[in-house]
């Protein structure tokens, strides 16, 4: 029973990283219909930021100072990426060159990381002490990541319902043509959505750095699991990403525990297939009408 | 008239002389077929340092059988699909005479049909038992093979720990799978009980599910077979977090890439851990260090101090020896470079090769250059600058 509790807690902790990637997927997707496949390597860049600025044994003050800086740095980077991605598109919904652009951004980030640090994996130490659970120690990073995922869920909910800019982005999500006709500067807000997505993923990478593989080739696993979390929860739904992330984290860990580590990745993809077969819109997604 | 008729003849003679001289000193094209990117890139960078040093030394001293070495670099990205494309480029486009590498069994298995068909000698560093002399008749590996590691690790667990049961944690690579099969066979032969087997993906940062599952079997020891130091670090970090104080009997990577693991898990995590290393890289007393490896350290540090400071020098030494073994084989075969001749020479004469490694033991039945007798259990954290490690049982 203790083992299952440990699996559940660690699974939710790991899943919160996937949830954060899923939320950042949603932010861009809602505003532009684009799935940004560079999110995984953006997360790794957030972790790299932590590696570069934090000392070997960081204190909480240093951590608190650099956390918002990591978010802002990645927001700026993703705004640039968003601009480049959206530039050639007349309509981000009807044209799909973004697929190549976002994958290219991911490849470029991986290549730059490789040139910069080689293929080694960097590690970051957390300023927070581990907490006890059923006779074991669980890294505080897991708890911090869960709190961050909840923070971004609440913050984005308030942003989309209380602020004019957020409401405008919500309007784009509902009907881009109508929003444009109403005078909303769609392209500018879409780039803004990329930046907000950067805030989410940059802070996530910084916070989760102690439990991440900060390497040139580790982004793929994060983007894949984040994508699964977003789709399982329902693409566009941040609540869905939260639940989907936790589900992916716990189910994959349980599969490794009970059936073997070789099933860890297969099970999360199986979860994706299963949910899509039974509920194509995801757990919290809404069925969408398509113009034909 | 004489002068006029002699001129063209002299010119022709000069051209012929130049042509002959050029043919005599045509460089020996050496393919460096490594995992320069991807999961195995750290060992590859280390191995490449050893190869670079060997080429530099050999070229400065006249080359191989009078031919300077011209290296051609190919990065297989630790991806068998890419490996096939890159080895085809080396063989068909660059027309290399011999190949050094690869370092990962999957890449070797993918590339061997091409080098075998081209009858090229190839000296890599892979550990899968699937790579037999039938699969790669001209391929030799300097890495300790999975079966040798399994035998040595079980020997260590039984002799030093009195272990009667064990669990195994390994990565998901081909060599690890071969290792697990060899381990199961050897454990059964020795009457040891296997309480559980788990695997993890490369770069997995949380192995707690695997470790919790293995802990249920309450084994006397945990066999840890890894391909990267980072994975070793994450496994040991997980053991510490779970408070599982099991004695870990590790493989070659656990010893050789201990510094990478210590950076993640800390030196304390190695308290109950042994690794496996080539005896040539070990010592018992700091006052009695192995001379061939000590000399290699001096040379490699002088050659490229920055790279030498951050890479695994024992691993570099094994690939360094590969180049020198190839040199010995070509020169011992009268300058021939074809795979059958070189393979026959290595099978018959490698036992007399005096490199950093010694006591090589390939044969027509096995192309693994190093056998279990050349291995020792070590304390991975008792490490001298350069990577020499203290043998288990020494103080």
Image (cartoon, rainbow, N blue to C red):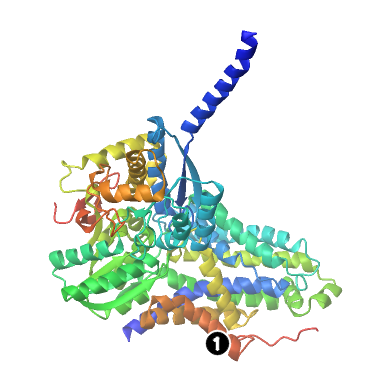
Residue B189: percent from left, percent from top? 18, 74
Occupied quadrant, residue B65: top left
In the drawing, does residue A5 fall left or right of residue A178? left
**Relative vertical location of residue A179 with respect to residue B350 in this rendering, above or below:** below
- Placement of the N terminus of chain B among the 4 image quadrants: top right
> Viewer-proximal residue, A23 or A85?
A85
In the drawing, does residue A44 fall left or right of residue B282? right
Q: Residue at x 47, y 54 (%)?
A: A119
Which chain letter matches label 1?
Answer: A
**Relative vertical location of residue B189 with respect to residue A240 in this rendering, above or below:** above
Residue B388 seen from this side: no
Q: Residue at x 39, y 67 (%)?
A: B174
| SS category of the residue bearing label 1 | helix
Residue B276 seen from this side: yes
**Relative vertical location of residue B133 with respect to residue A247 in this rendering, above or below:** above
Residue A289: percent from left, percent from top? 75, 86
Occupied quadrant, residue A236: bottom right
Occupied quadrant, residue B140: bottom left
> Viewer-proximal residue, B63 or B41?
B63
Q: Residue at x 42, y 68 (%)?
A: B204
Which residue reaches farthest bottom?
Answer: A278
Q: Residue at x 25, y 79 (%)?
A: B195
Residue B130: percent from left, percent from top? 36, 66
Mark 1, Cα crowd under 10 Å, few <14 / some 14-19 / many 20+, is few
Residue B116: percent from left, percent from top? 44, 56
> Viewer-proximal residue, A174 or A129?
A174
In the drawing, does residue A273 fall left or right of residue B208? right
- Residue labelled with disc 1: A274
**Relative vertical location of residue A96 with respect to residue A64 in this rendering, above or below:** below
In the drawing, does residue B179 fall left or right of residue A86? left
């Amino acid at each position: 029973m203790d083992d299952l509790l440990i699996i559940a807690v660690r699974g939710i902790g790991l899943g919160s990283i996937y949830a954060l990637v899923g939320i950042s997927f949603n932010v861009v997707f809602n505003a532009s219909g684009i799935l940004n496949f560079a999110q995984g390597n953006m997360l790794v860049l957030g972790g790299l930021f932590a590696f570069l600025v934090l000392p070997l044994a960081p204190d909480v003050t240093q951590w608190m100072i650099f956390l918002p800086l990591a978010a802002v740095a990645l927001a700026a980077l993703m705004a640039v990426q968003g601009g480049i991605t959206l530039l050639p598109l007349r309509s981000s919904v009807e044209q799909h060159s973004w697929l190549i652009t976002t994958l290219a951004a991911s490849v470029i980030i991986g290549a730059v990381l490789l040139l910069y640090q080689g293929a080694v994996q960097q590690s970051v130490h957390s300023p927070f002490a581990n907490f006890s659970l059923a006779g074991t120690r669980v890294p505080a990073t897991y708890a911090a990541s869960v709190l961050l995922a909840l923070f971004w869920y609440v913050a984005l909910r308030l942003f989309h319902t209380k602020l004019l800019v957020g409401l405008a982005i919500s309007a784009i999500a509902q009907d881009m043509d109508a929003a444009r006709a109403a005078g909303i500067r769609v392209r500018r807000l879409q780039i803004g959505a990329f930046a907000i997505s950067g805030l989410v993923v940059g802070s996530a990478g910084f916070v989760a750095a102690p439990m991440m593989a900060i390497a040139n080739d580790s982004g793929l696993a994060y983007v894949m699991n984040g994508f699964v979390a977003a789709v399982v929860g329902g693409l566009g739904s941040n609540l869905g990403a939260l639940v989907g992330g936790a589900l992916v984290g716990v189910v994959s860990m349980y599969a490794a525990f009970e059936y073997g580590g070789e099933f860890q990745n297969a099970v999360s993809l199986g979860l994706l297939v299963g949910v899509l077969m039974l509920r194509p819109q995801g757990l919290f997604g809404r069925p969408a009408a398509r113009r034909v | 008239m004489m002068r006029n008729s002699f001129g063209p003849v002299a010119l022709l003679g000069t051209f012929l002389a130049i042509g002959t001289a050029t043919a005599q000193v045509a460089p020996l094209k050496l393919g460096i077929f490594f995992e320069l990117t991807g999961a195995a890139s750290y060992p590859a960078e280390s191995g490449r340092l050893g190869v670079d040093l060997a080429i530099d030394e050999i070229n400065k001293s006249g080359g191989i059988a009078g031919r300077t070495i011209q290296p051609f670099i190919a990065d297989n990205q630790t991806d068998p699909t890419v490996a096939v494309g890159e080895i085809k480029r080396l063989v068909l486009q660059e027309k290399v005479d011999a190949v050094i590498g690869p370092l990962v069994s999957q890449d070797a298995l993918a590339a061997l049909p091409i080098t075998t068909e081209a009858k090229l000698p190839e000296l890599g560093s892979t550990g899968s038992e699937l790579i037999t002399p039938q699969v790669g008749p001209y391929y030799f590996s300097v890495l300790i093979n999975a079966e040798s590691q399994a035998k040595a690790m079980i020997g260590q667990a039984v002799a030093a720990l009195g272990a009667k049961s064990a669990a195994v944690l390994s990565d998901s690579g081909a060599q690890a799978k071969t290792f697990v099969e060899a381990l199961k066979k050897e454990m059964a032969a020795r009457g040891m009980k296997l309480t559980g087997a788990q695997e993890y993906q490369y770069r997995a940062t949380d192995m707690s599910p695997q470790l919790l599952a293995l802990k249920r079997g309450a084994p006397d020891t945990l066999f840890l077979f890894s391909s990267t130091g980072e994975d070793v670090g994450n496994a040991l970090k997980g053991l510490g977090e779970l408070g599982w104080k099991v004695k870990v009997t590790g493989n070659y990577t656990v010893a050789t890439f201990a510094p990478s693991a210590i950076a993640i898990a800390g030196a304390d995590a190695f308290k109950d851990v042994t690794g496996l290393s080539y005896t040539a890289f070990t010592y018992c007393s700091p006052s009695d260090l192995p001379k061939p490896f000590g000399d290699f350290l001096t040379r490699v540090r002088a050659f490229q101090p920055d790279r030498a400071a951050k890479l695994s020098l024992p691993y570099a030494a094994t690939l360094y020896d590969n180049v020198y073994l190839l040199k010995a084989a070509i020169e011992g075969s009268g300058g021939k470079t074809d795979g059958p001749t070189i393979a026959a020479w290595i099978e018959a004469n490698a036992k007399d090769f005096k490199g950093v490694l010694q006591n090589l033991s390939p044969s027509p039945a096995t192309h693994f250059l190093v056998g279990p007798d050349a291995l020792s259990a070590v304390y991975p954290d008792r490490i001298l600058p350069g990577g020499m490690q203290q043998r288990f049982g020494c103080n």
